[in-house]
Amino acid sequence: MDFKSVGMLHSIQGINIGLAPPFVVMGVTLICIWLLHLLLKQINHRRRLQAVLPPGSMGLPLLGETLEFFTRSPALDLLPFFKRRMERYGPIFKTNLVGKDLIVSLDPDVNHYVLQQEEKAFHIWFPESFMRLLGEENIAKCYGSLHKNTRNMIRRVFGPENLRLVLLHDMQGAVERTLSSWHDRQSVELKPALSSMIFGIAAKWMIGYEASVLSGDLWKNFDAFNQGLLSFPLYIPGTAFYKCMQGRNNVMKALKQVLDERRKKAETPERMDFIDVIVSELNKQNPALSENIALNVLFLMIFASFETTSSGLTAALKFLSDNPKALQELEEEHQQIRERRADPDTGVTWEEYKSMKFTSHVINESLRLANVAPVLFRKATQDVHIKGYTIPEGWIVMICPPAVHLNPTTYEDPSVFNPWRWKDHSEPVGGSKDFIAFGSGLRLCVGVDFARLQMAIFLHFLVTKYRLKVVSGGDMVFGPGLGFPNGFQVQLERKK
């Protein structure tokens, strides 16, 4: 008990209660009990934290260790921020980033446990600035039956059955048109070009983009949002964060316009996109989600579908351009698929897609090294005891997928692009302990099959019809997400 608290109690004790009414006596007594309870709770909490928190440093006041965390470094290695602290403290340590106390886990067992305990001992969490960008009502705040119902709605459009029957065909047309347009250009800036292509595919099946009244401004606003996503949260005109927020606001207005138009239509289309599924749900007597949540889900699904997939695919093309042996084996696999057809120029069938074993290895290895989701956050909903430490209720755990994917105990020569290693590894269906590129547990990315199919179809048409030549750039960095600071310009040459 500190001096201030002691003085307060003495002051209370010094009140002449002999002449006071009974309700005053009772009130003073309750206040004393309440103050004592708070004081003892605080003392016990501090003692408990000092005894069981992992080692580490909280850094500078306000800033914590934020500046070092956001320092860029060459890709294909763990960020120096993590490496230095793992050498000093071990794979579990505490830190402070952007004013938030965190426990960082580089331990595969701890990571797996935390992710599997979603909606039990942990739930998903994002920094406040990020939540501001996602909106107050978003899928990250969906729990229990609401989260389950939302995922089931998404699967109606992007589940395996619809991928096989409908989206597979649509993807092929979009990829062929994109590659043909690239062939006519001197060079192509690969990452934004892939983002634009995948955005078109995703937007069509989210909101019927091609038939809508929206213009190309939708893509520009999504791109503005993406450019400022990891910027300093300073909402002043001219800043990246301001442009990011403006981009989001403009997209939300456009999505609201599309949703309103669909709700006015009486008939249900035979081929439903995701916004049709949402309208069907909202028109029920007791809908599973509100309109605001539906719009935020739409926004996040479109954004996640093109940003993460384009990053993974750009990384795959970088790795293949640096590894002629892997590129040759990939070309041979797809050439054999063409040769088995009665007509080599017919489209890819679902059975052919499922037969692309080496392609799957290339995708796995590219996602392992690209680490398009550099960190995952979870918040403890109760005290959790693990590996000799306690994660206190209310504390945030930062999980680091690169530490899992670059673990030399699991992957020999982990910084080397080696798709053949996956012949000896089981296919990472869902989220495994050693491969969390798409998350794990209840929050496993619902679009994982959609993303993998897009990557495979693009690689098929690229290696069977074109040769890719690197013009300039291609340097990869982490800081903490994947980036190409010098760009990555390529040129396509049609095969004869």
Image (spheres, rainbow, N blue to C red):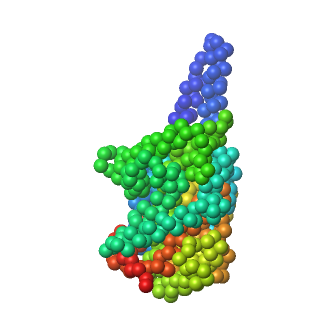
Between 440 and 258, the one lying in front of the other is 258
Viewer-side residue, 223 vs 379: 223
Residue 118 pos. (x, y %): 66, 54
Horizontal and vertical percent for residue 258? 48, 43
Residue under the point 40% across and 64% down:
192
At horizontal 64% and vertical 77% (from top left) the residue drawn is 355
Q: Residue at x 67, y 76 (%)?
A: 426
Residue 423 drawn above or below residue 291: below
Q: Residue furthest left?
A: 238
Task: Kindly give the residue lying farthest to the front in the view shown.
Answer: 342
Is residue 328 positioned above or below 477 on the image?
below
On the question of residue 160 being in view, the answer is yes
How many discs mark residues in the rendered view? 0
* Position of 178 relative to 465 (above/below): above
What quarter of the picture does the N terminus occupy?
top right
Seen from the viewer's position, the closer of residues 231 and 38 is 231
Residue 113 is situated, as x and y percent measured from the top left of the image, at 67, 61
**Where residue 346 sits: x, y (%)?**
56, 74
- Residue 382 visible in rendering: no
- Which of the 4 image quadrants contains residue 288? top right
Which residue: 50% across, 80% down? 464
Left or right side of 311 for 269: right
Judge by depth and name the residue closer to the eye, 434 or 157: 157
Q: Quadrant of the C terminus?
A: bottom left
